[in-house]
Amino acid sequence: MTRQDDAANRKLAVFPTFHKVEGRRVVVVGSAEEAAAKVRLLAETRARIEVIAPRIKPAVAAALDTAGGVWVRARFQPGLLEGAALVFAASGEERQDTAVVEAARKLGIPANAVDRPELCDFYVGALVNRAPVAIAITSTGVGPVLARHIRARIEALLPRETGDLARLAESFRDTVARVIVGAAERRRFWARFFSSPVAAHLQAGRPDVARAEAQRLLNSRSDDAGFVWLVGAGPGAEDLLTLRAQRVLQEADVIVHDALVPGEVIAMGRRDAERIAVGKRKGAHSVSQAQINAILVREAALGRRVVRLKAGDPLVFGRAGEEMAALREAGVAYDIVPGVTAALAAAASARIPLTLRGIASDLVFATGHDRSGDTLPGWAGLAMGGATVAVYMGRSVAARVAERLAEAGLAAETPVVVVENAAQRGETLYAGTLCDLAAFEGRDDVTGPALIVIGKAVGHADLPESQPLRAMLASRAVAAA
Ligand code: SAH
């Protein structure tokens, strides 16, 4: 798949909107089996439901009765659609459905023909109703069963009282707008409101206590100081983010992120949050660490809620120590949200038991080079003792790392696995031994972030498909031919 194909696949063929139907006629023409399902779905709304058909099936009649809709006992005529907000063609006959859709279009009314996507102006999503909150899920006709499956999961996730919470918030809206002047401050109040015990009280059937709690929140509101979360974004896959990381991303006014954090994760923040890229790629420091520290302090001083988003875990080779010191010095409150560090993601992908009874009882998170760029096999002794060593930032110094380890006496046949782009698109595994590691450094076909795992335990990996660590010249020549 080309990059363009990939980009195009990520775009929707539809634009989700919510159509106003309160007090308006929504017309179902025909009485096929599916008409009953449409009537039941429409019954979730405040539309005035009409079924137009000369005869009507018992299931449709029953649904209509429950919904409090009306049956217009007539053959279809275009004039009957006039003034309708939406039209559903559900006769089960192609010619009739086509005529209905065409008539609706002439009147400027959007139409849907049941089970005939080619005739539809709009699709109907699987609905989760928490009025006034509505969630509609569509697979754009590709996988209706999948859409229903997702719906079931959202139903389970979203308490029944979500609608009550929305209504309670609505009843406070004017007061909040009067009492809290700044838009950013108001947003912070609502963020606190929705994550406060108000929701829990509603769920427990204590609406009065919920209301009192909401009032208390409003009264006790202090002028908010800024706040910084140092957040681990994990190795890249969106679903390896923690739930807490996801929540604070939603609360952040500003997201300060590294180059290694994929766009999909950065996009999980609020749409109106400011995004500041401080990408640091090896050798090309676009923004210095001192500047990053200054940005965090400055944004927090403006009263903003800042997420400092880092790849993996923020406390592992993430320079969090310097950021924490700067925040502490400036008196800015902060919290840390851990993430799945690259070593753990790489081990999971390569199915390496990082510790193994009787084989490996130490686990070392090491870096390929220190501040001066020198290799640091200070952990060579540990490797000798059977530790599993995960080497970060090791690709460009793999040869020296291998050399020093060999000098220290580590066996040339010690197993090594490298995971490139762990838990990301383009993930690739390379397997070999310590003596292949030097050759790995020279490979110009490995360009993604790579994590090297060395140790006896690596030999016990249930390794999925992998490539040799040492690029095979012959196969490259074939590929080039
Ligand atoms: N804080 C990060 C590490 C940052 S240092 C963490 O906890 O993971 C950057 C190094 O991490 C890279 O040079 C690479 O060795 C490793 N790394 C980060 N993401 C990776 C990924 N998805 N796959 C493989 N290695 C990764």
Image (tube, rainbow, N blue to C red):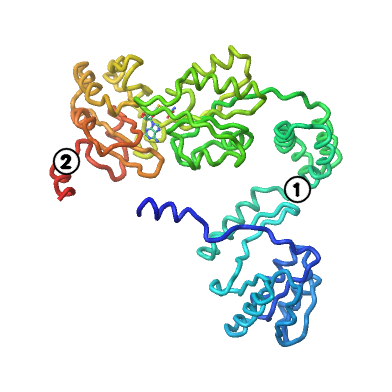
Residue occupying the point 25% across, 22% down: 401
Numbered badge on residue 371: none
Q: Secondary structure at mark 2?
A: loop
Residue occupying the point 67% across, 72% down: 108
Whether the residue under disc 1 has CB within 8 Å of ligand 1: no
Q: In the rendered view of the protein, which quadrant contains the N terminus?
A: bottom left
Q: Vertical placement of 445 versus 91: above or below?
A: above
The spot of residue 62 in percent (x, y) is: 76, 76
Q: Is residue 341 in sight in this rendering?
A: yes
- Amino acid type, label 2: Met
Numbered badge on residue 161: 1
- Amino acid type, label 1: Glu
Q: Vertical placement of 81 versus 402: above or below?
A: below
Which quadrant does ligand 1 occupy? Answer: top left
Q: Is residue 1 left or right of residue 251?
A: left
Numbered badge on residue 472: 2
